[in-house]
Image: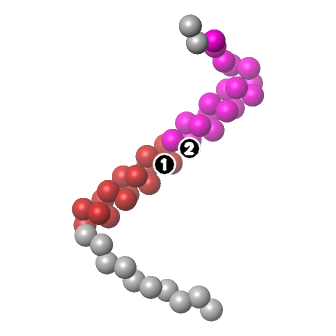
Amino acid sequence: MASSETVTISRAEYARLKKHEKIDVELLTSLVKSLEDIKAGRIREWV
């Protein structure tokens, strides 16, 4: 059986971590969409 621990952080630190979590999800979503575009051949050459 795993034990759980409680960690206390400041409200500011909590807000910062939640912001990073949101950014990470947005980044992953963007990467997945980009890979789907590449697989489907929807790419352009950089000029």
| Quadrant (top left/top right/bottom left/bottom right) for the N terminus | bottom right
Q: Is residue 37 above or below residue 46?
A: below
Residue 22 percent location from the top left of the image: 43, 50
Whether the magenta-drawn stretch holds residue 12 is answered as no
Disc 2 crowd, CA 10 A, few/some/many (<14, 14-19, 20+)? few
Which residue is farthest top? 47
- Residue 5 location, quadrant: bottom left
> Compared with residue 34, is residue 10 higher up or lower down, i.e. above or below?
below
Up-down relation of residue 4 to residue 46 (above or below):
below
Q: Which amino acid does label 2 sit on?
A: Leu
Secondary structure of residue under mark 2 = helix
In which quarter of the view is residue 14 placed? bottom left
Query: Does 42 appear in magenta?
Result: yes
Highlighted magenta segment, given as a residue range? 27-45
Q: Which amino acid lies under the numbered mark 1 shown in the image of this protein?
A: Asp
Q: Which colour scheme is used?
A: secondary structure
Residue at figure coordinates x 53%, y 89% from the top left: 3
Location of mark 1 (residue): 24
The residue at the point 56 percent across, 41 percent down is 29
Image location (x, y in percent) of residue 42: 68, 19
